[in-house]
Image (cartoon, rainbow, N blue to C red):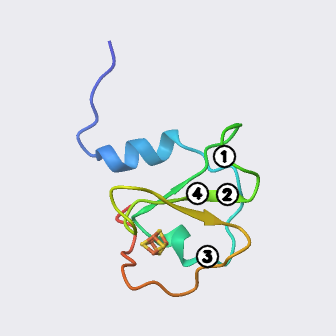
Amino acid sequence: MTEKNPEVTPEAFLADLMTPEYERTGHICWDCDHFKPVQKGSQFPPADTIGWCMKIHWPFYQVITDFNVVKKCFVFEEKKI
Ligand code: SF4
């Protein structure tokens, strides 16, 4: 049986489990709370996709590609963890 650590938030626990496939690039999205990066070893997304935005075009996902670098965003929110 595992013991619960009350100091670890659900967001911090999830971030610890998930390892991005790609290195950080010039995208502001890497520091945004709405960005979900492609997970290591994933074969699913097209090669140029580094992740998805869960805020723009909600309830659908906006694909973030390596090619189009996002430098400014009107709904950017700093990552909480
Ligand atoms: S809200 Fe803007 S900065 Fe955040 S992930 Fe989406 S596109 Fe990137």
Tell me the mark number nearer the camera, choosing from 2 and 3: 2
For the residues carrying marks 3 and 1, which lies nearer the camera in this image?
A: 1
- CB of residue at label 3: within 8 Å of ligand 1? yes
Is the CB of the residue bearing disc 1 within 8 angstroms of ligand 1? no
Is label 4 within 8 A of ligand 1 (CB to nearest ligand atom)?
yes
Q: Residue at x 34, y 61 (%)?
A: 58
- Whole-percent x, y for residue 71 in the image: 58, 85
Q: Are marks 4 and 1 in contact (CB under 8 Å)?
A: no
Q: Which labelled disc corresponds to residue 77?
A: none
Mark 1 sits on what residue? 45
Q: Earlier in the sequence, mark 3 or mark 1?
A: 3
Q: Position of residue 27 (x, y in %)?
A: 61, 76
Numbered tag placed on residue 27 in the rendering: 3
| Residue 41 visible to the viewer | yes
> What secondary structure is found at the residue carrying circle 4?
strand
Give the alpha-carbon distance from disc 3 to disc 4, as whole Å: 11 Å
Q: Secondary structure at mark 1?
A: loop
Amino acid type of the residue that numbered disc 4 sits on in the rendered structure: Gly
Asked whether the beta carbons under mark 3 and mark 1 sit within 8 Å of each other, the answer is: no
Disc 3 crowd rating (10 Å Cα; few below 14, some 14-19, many 20+) is some
| Residue positioned 74% across, 59% down in the render | 48
For the residues bearing labels 3 and 4, Cβ distance under 8 angstroms: no
The numbered mark, 4 or 1, whose residue comes first in the sequence reads: 1
Residue, disc 4? 51
Amino acid type shown at disc 1? Pro
Q: Nearer the viewer, mark 4 or mark 1?
A: 1
Q: Is residue 58 left or right of residue 53?
A: left
Give the labeled residue for mark 2: 49
Q: Amino acid at mark 3?
A: His
